Amino acid sequence: MLDIKLKKPRQQKIFLFLIGIFFVSSCSSSPTLSFDDLASVTSTTISTSTTSTTSVNTTDSTSFEETKLNYDQTVRQQFQELVRWQDKCYQQPKSCRVEEFTIVGTKYHQALSEQISLYAKNNINSRPGRGKREVAIESITFDDAALVAQVDACIHDTVILYMDGFIFNDHVSSSQTLWTLQLDNQRWKWIGFQILHREYNTNICQEQK
């Protein structure tokens, strides 16, 4: 449910503008973000108990397993760091540096930068202790030639967004998502994000356990 208590004409115009962006972005499968797609969080739980696959081709089974394990562990660890980075950005959008966890020049970087700038300009943010996002990694696949990894993850999101001190978005949702990461100077960074399936007021991640 969206609970908005705005009285000023300026705030009403801002709200109509933001809602327009939400509907445009939610109707596309492109990496352009909507407000609900990457809602800020106050705490994050990440589960990484599932198996992953890799596209590494080699006749040496030992080398294959070592390469697979190294990639898998590195991506899982740095994916968690990226999620925490993003959490802090939504709590303090004015001090957010999107280039810390995305690759500059990609569509995802541009879309996220625009959203964070809009949040900062209109005083939209999350607050500690007011909801959380639980991220469960389900699988990881690799394209070694392109140095790209894809992470399938289920996200349960109960975060609350505020605008000028009032509730802007308090939707409870869970989503099947696909994150694309690319290796950049020894760091895995996001270059793409898609919501494959989303439901409200339920936890589809818990149902799949």
Image (spheres, rainbow, N blue to C red):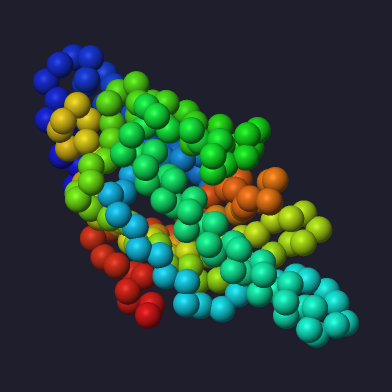
Q: Nearer the viewer, residue 152 or 132?
A: 132
**Residue at the (33%, 34%) spot, across then down:** 92
Residue 40 is situated, as x and y percent measured from the top left of the image, at 33, 44
Give the total number of marks visible in the rendering: 0
Relative side of 54 to 204, left or right: right
**Residue at the (54%, 39%) spot, across then down:** 100
**Residue at the (77%, 54%) spot, across then down:** 146
Give the position of the C terminus as an image quadrant. bottom left
Residue 192 is situated, as x and y percent measured from the top left of the image, at 58, 47
Q: Nearer the viewer, residue 56 or 30?
A: 56
Relative side of 17 to 170, left or right: right
Residue 103 is situated, as x and y percent measured from the top left of the image, at 62, 40
With respect to residue 103, does 159 lie above or below? below
Residue farthest top in this picture: 9
Residue farthest right in this picture: 59
Q: Would you identify the image quadrant in which residue 31 lies? A: top right
Relative side of 148 to 41, left or right: right
Relative side of 75 to 68, left or right: left
Q: Would you identify the image quadrant in which residue 56 lies? A: bottom right
Can the viewer see residue 101 in this picture? yes
With respect to residue 170, does 12 lie above or below? above
Can the viewer see residue 199 in this picture? no
Residue 59 is situated, as x and y percent measured from the top left of the image, at 88, 82
Q: Nearer the viewer, residue 110 or 182?
A: 182
